[in-house]
Structure formats: C-alpha cells, structure tokens
Image (cartoon, grey):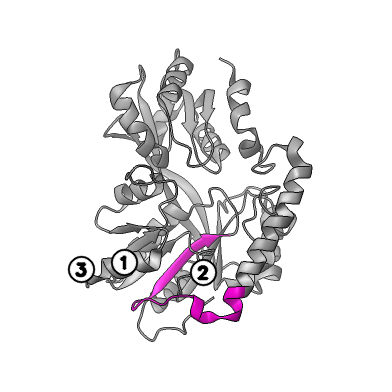
Amino acid sequence: MNLSREMGKAHSHTTRYGPLHPALNPVARLASCLYVWGVNSRNRRFDADATRAHRLPLPVVSIGNITAGGTGKTPFTSWLADVLTTAGRNPVIAMRGYKARHGKESDEQSEHRRRLPNIDVVANPDRHAALLKYLKSNSECDCVLLDDGFQHRQLAREIDLVLVDATAPLPDQDRLLPAGWLREPAENLTRADAVILTRADLKDEARLDRLRKTITRLHGKPPLAEFCHAWSHLTLDMETQQPTTWLAQKRLVVTCGIGNPKSVIDMAGQCGAVIVATHVLKDHAPFTSADVNRIKELSIGADAVLTTEKDWSKLEPLLRQQPLDVPIVRPFLEMTPLAGTEPLTQAVIQACTPNGIEHNDR
C-alpha cells in the first residue's frame, strides 16, 4: 500500500501550508488581498451600525474561530451544552448547516444530534429567521449556542468565544485564506470576549507560552481557558463500544474529510495503532461509492478502518449498500479542560442569565 500516494490528496491539509498547494502561492497571495479587503469592508459595516445585528428575545453564546479547519467547535459546543443543562438552562444549538445536500442534514448537524440527542439543532444560513420560527413552538428554550458564529455578525450575541488551536501556526504568523488558514485578520481577536486554547496539551511548553503571549497581545487579555482533545471511547461498526486501548497494534486505514486530518492520524498513532494507509478528502467533502471502493482496496490486510464521527454521517448510508470487509471504528472526541474552567463556566452562565451582562452587538 502506498501511504504517500494517498496522503498526497490532502497534502496541503496535513502539512498545513494552506488551503491551496504551495505551487499556487503567487495566485493565493493575490486572492488573499482580495479576500481581506472583502472581510474588512464587511466588518466595517457592522462596526459602524450595530442595528445590522438582529437580536433574539433570549441570550446567545457564540462559539467560533478565526481559522479554517478543525479547532474543536463541535465538541466544545457539546461541552458548553452540558455546562448549561447542568445549570438548569435549556439551550438550542444554531448553525449554518454547511454543505447540507438534497434536504439531508449536514455532517456537523448530524454529529450534534448524535452527541446531544436531547438538545434541538436548528440549521439554516439565516439563523435569525430560523430561530424565530423555532421559538414560536419551543418556548421552553432559554438560550442559544451559536456554532461557528464569530463571522456570522448578523446575529447579536451576549458573549463571543473564539477557539484557537495550539498546534496551528501562531495567529500573527499565519496568512489569510486562501494563502493561509486565517478567516479574518488576527487582530480581530479584539472583537472576542474570550479566547479559548484547544489542543493545549503540547509537550513544547515554550511554544505554548509564545502562543499565550501572542493571544494576550492581540486580544488584550490572556486566554480564558485551555482544553485538550481526547478520545473517550470507540464505536465499532454500528454500535459496539470499545476502549481506546482496542487500537493498540491494530493496522488501520484512516479516512476522513475534516479540516485537520493530521490530528486524527496522530491521535490514532498515539493510541498505538499502525497506520497502513489513509484516504483523505477535503473538509466537508461528500464520500462517494468510488471512495468506498478505494477504502476497501486499501483495507486489504488491515485490521480496521478508522473515521470520525462527523464523517460517519456521510459514510454510513454508503456502507449499508457497500459493506467493508473489516470493522469500521470511530472515536468519540471530547474536550477535556486543563485550565480556566471556573471563570469560563461563570462567564457563560452569567451571559445566559437575564440582566447578566451587557449585550455584545459586535
């Protein structure tokens, strides 16, 4: 099996050069100039007129980032939902539903439903209109978790939380899309109420300290909290649960279509698995019958195929028609707090309490 050939399909993602191949850097730099002009123009319009942000009759907590790719918004949103329900609140999750197809749920919406079966998920590009419609028949809902909300300035929020991946390039050393991974300039972190570091369990403490200082300089305050990503358990085939130790010495094919596939490959290796091949798609890309056939070819001689919870939404219907010859396993990703849990929890609960804090129309 040719691991390097399969990895080449996602070369820019696994090495984090940027969304475009390095050979296209001159074009990407020009496109980045146009992109940042558009982003800055849009932000200036919202900065100049707070009434552009529509306000809901209940508090909104925004969870977002300033980079494309996996910073951990979905598991962090799940963690916040648990915090709020434990505090007696009744949240609803609102999101765009990116790349939902033919009336089907998006991969992220399906993942939220599996993670939090007792919490409703509203997916619509017009979050304000969709939430107003939802609230007419769901009056018991008392707060909104706005997934990927930092750039969605059309909806006012009580608190803006921004996640920064500690393994990604330092924000002030990255470039704007498509030459780099930034969705907007790093100095726009000043618009956030709090910055949360994810994947902060780095062995390189010096690098982590540089990141904390960079965040403090850009945001004006140090990170409020720090989290690491951890796999709590595995789901084997359709429903059997196994501990993560099941992966030890297993020969795996890893397949996924997420923003940071390297994180999945690395975590599988840290669990003792032997990665024999990968089949990596672009973030949110759909799996096809041809993809399943290729995965079956790569899995000859392997012990299992590993994919993510997000990708399972797209793979499951295909695998019912084209079952694999080896088990398929998906790890359950959780956010584990390392520092700052108490101030973060207090800030979120206060934001969701009537008259708790001032409105943030940014």
Res. 222 in view: no
Q: Whole-Å distance between the Cαs marked 3 and 1?
A: 14 Å
Mark 3 or mark 1: which comes first in sequence? 1
Q: Residue 342: image x %, image y %?
A: 45, 70
Question: Disc 1 vs disc 2: which is toward the camera?
Answer: 2
Q: Residue placed at 35% from the left, 51% from the top?
A: 112
Residue under label 2: 153
- Disc 3 vs disc 2: Cβ atoms closer than 8 Å? no
269 vs 30: above or below: above
Location of the N terminus (image quadrant): top right
Characterize the local packing of mark 2: few (<14), some (14-19) or many (20 or more) Cα atoms within 10 angstroms. Answer: some
Residue under label 1: 91
Q: Residue placed at 54% from the left, 52% from the top?
A: 71
Q: Which mark is residue 339?
A: none
**Residue type highlighted by circle 1:** Pro
Q: For the residue labelled by badge 2, is the local secondary structure a helix, a strand or a loop?
A: loop
Mark 1 or mark 2: which comes first in sequence? 1
Q: Whole-Å distance between the Cαs marked 3 and 2?
A: 25 Å
Q: Residue furthest bottom?
A: 355
Residue under label 3: 137
* Residue 142 lies in the magenta-colored region: no
Front-lying residue, 104 or 234:
104
Q: Residue 173: image x %, image y %?
A: 74, 55
* 154 relative to 221 in the view: left or right: left
Location of the C terminus (image quadrant): bottom right
Question: Disc 3 vs disc 1: which is toward the camera?
Answer: 3
Q: Residue placed at 42% from the left, 28% from the top?
A: 288
16 vs 341: above or below: above
Q: Which residues are magenta?
A: 45-65
**Residue type highlighted by circle 3:** Ser
Characterize the local packing of mark 3: few (<14), some (14-19) or many (20 or more) Cα atoms within 10 angstroms. Answer: few
